[in-house]
Image: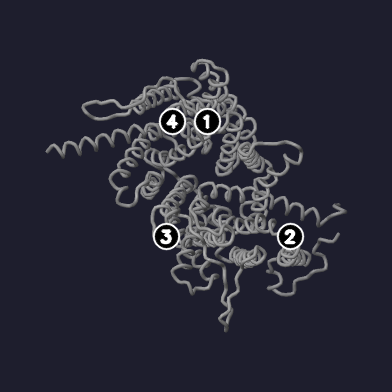
Amino acid sequence: MFYRESGQFSSSYKQDQAIFPLRQDRIGVYLILLVAFFGVPLFASDYLISAIFIPFLILALAALGLNVLTGYAGQLSLGTGGFMAVGAFMAYKFATGMPDMPIILVLLMGGLMAAAVGIMFGIPSLRIKGFYLAVATLAAQFFIEWLFIKVGWFTNYSASGVITAPPLAIGLPFTSLEYVFDTSTKKYVFTLSFVVVLALATKNLIRSHIGRGWMAIRDMDIAAEIIGFRPLQTKLSAFAVSSFLCGVAGALWAFVHLGTVEPEAFGINRSFSILFMIIIGGLGSIMGAFIGAAFITLLPIFLNNVPPMLGMNLAVDLVVHIEFMVFGILIVFFLIVEPHGLARLWSIGKEKLRTWPFPY
Amino acid sequence: MQDFLGEFYFFLEVLISGLLTGTLYSLIALGFVLIFKASGVFNFAQGAMMLFAALSFVGIQEKLGVPWPVAFVLAVLIMVILAYLVDKLVLGKLVNQEPIILFMATIGITFFIDGFGQTIWGSDIKVLDIGIPTGPLFIFDILIDKLELVAGVVAAIMVAGLAIFFSKTKVGRALRAVADDHQAALSVGISLHHIWIIVWSVAGLVGLIAGIMWGTKLGVQFSLSLVALKALPVLILGGFTSIPGAIVGGLIIGAGEKLAEIYIGPFIGGAIENWFAYMLAMVFLLFRPQGLFGEKIIERV
């Protein structure tokens, strides 16, 4: 009744090609952005912001990165944690090596270095496919982890291997003043701006010929090659963009969320949890990355808080094990019931809404 | 001269220890190969199955106080039930899905089994001792770990047994038929579900034996499922479909890893065991994408 395209006509090619051609969708997105930028900082508590919203946004960015590679370009990767670690550590090196570099540039440089490493580990994908590639990306994961633990240069020879990230500060133009993102609310807005800009950029990239190339390679690489997509450029660009996003996410995770840079934060379990996000959220969907990230971030909190509310007292390690089990069941459940994830449910819901309340 | 001999003996020791550790990897890899051959499913859960089997084995011994052969039988029974449930609840519902979906489903199974096993049996490190000899043994002045020797023998027996099972028995022939072509197998009256349950049970048995070996070596604990990840490079070296490949791959990875750790490790900071196997496998794949013994990958549009 309210959600339909009747009466809305595109009178130019540009209008027709808009990301959200439907007015209702646009209004919805603006509302979400409004709430995210103003509603949450104004009304959410500090704990809520620093324990839920910030990790959610950063993990969503990483999931977006993996989704570019696995969901759009069809290259299964188990090395996400490794690429995030590259972003975090290289951003740290830039921040300490060149203290004058603006923090935004530092984070982006972390992402770029991760992209370079991603391209290197993406080279085998030209010969290796499917599961074989998944194992090859494990090489990236373990090698990078080892590198940052063993090679002192990356941690500026700190004894413990855990290093404090520099404060987030932006020099204001034409003055010597600095604006420091010190409270969790400011950090949240900082992260949110990053995520929104990068998500928008990714969405547009996927709508361009580059993104169409990725999808062609995913659907059938030989056929894609025959119709003129070069596998080398297409696959490596997917690796580059994916690890860039993961790298930025890793840098944000270290600089904004943890405040420390440590290899343990980017272990193999991180890679898996991000893979789960895109499976549950939906492979090949930007929104899926966000829904999946929200789901995986909220589930442990839910499991931690609900049993005590019901009067059950579970031991801490038991909760962890139950969390494992629930994750496992959910993954299988989603693969059986809806292999395209929560994002698909959302679009089915929208289809239904178009004809509601008179479907015939 | 004396120095040179000493060096050489040391090299031999490292090599043999590596080869024997390699057979332990092969034991895990065997389970993967079995399932991949028969159902085309890349079973990520093999490591978790190994951990779960070993946990059940030790847990039954502890809780019921029965001698280990009884516990072994009960553990096998548990693995058969697990196989049945996996087929009934997961794979049966995912027939005709893409391999990658099935692979992700097994990741889900991995998480479930890991959590379930530790919920039931607890997560502390358990000692596993069923009288497998451990400790050093000297043959011609070369030090060999007894456990690794036993593992080597067990692996050899299992491979021989599986080879006979696959080639001589009726079930084995049915398994190969299913591996070859699901639909053709169905049309000559082979029940896919039976086959899958059998294969997953056998893989569970292989997992149990591998778990007992590794459990004797390291104690039964969660990190066993990380050891199982080492079986992945073994697999891609050997090829997913080849049982001899799993053995040879295991030997190469085991020996390569140990030698690299001793002779290259000190120059670049040590502890390279963690990633060396993966790198070796990756570089190897660049030249031979289907592994040593894998079937040639033919692609059609």
Of all chains, the one bearing label 3 is: A
Label 3 neighbour load within 10 Å: few <14, some 14-19, many 20+? some
Do the numbered discs 2 and 1 sit on residues whose CB atoms are within 8 Å? no
Give the mark, 2 or 3, whose residue is nearer the N terminus: 2
Foreground mark, 3 or 4, reads 3
Foreground mark, 2 or 1, reads 2
Foreground mark, 4 or 1, reads 4
Q: Quadrant of residue A49?
A: bottom right
Q: Which mark is residue A154?
A: 3
Do the numbered discs 3 and 1 sit on residues whose CB atoms are within 8 Å? no
What residue is pinned by disc 4? B214
Amino acid type, residue under disc 3 in the picture: Phe
- CA distance for labels 3 and 1: 51 Å
Amino acid type, residue under disc 4 in the picture: Trp
Whether labels 3 and 1 belong to a single chain: the reply is no
Who is closer to the viewer here, A281 or A82? A82
Furthest-right residue in this view: A358
For residue A311, side relative to residue B161 (left or right): right
Amino acid type, residue under disc 1 in the picture: Val
- CA distance for labels 3 and 4: 35 Å
Q: Which mark is residue A44?
A: 2
Give the mark, 4 or 1, whose residue is nearer the N terminus: 1
x and y percent of residue A232 in the render?
Answer: 45, 60
Q: Which mark is residue B178?
A: 1
- CA distance for labels 2 and 4: 50 Å
Who is closer to the viewer here, A341 or A55? A55
Do the numbered discs 2 and 3 sit on residues whose CB atoms are within 8 Å? no
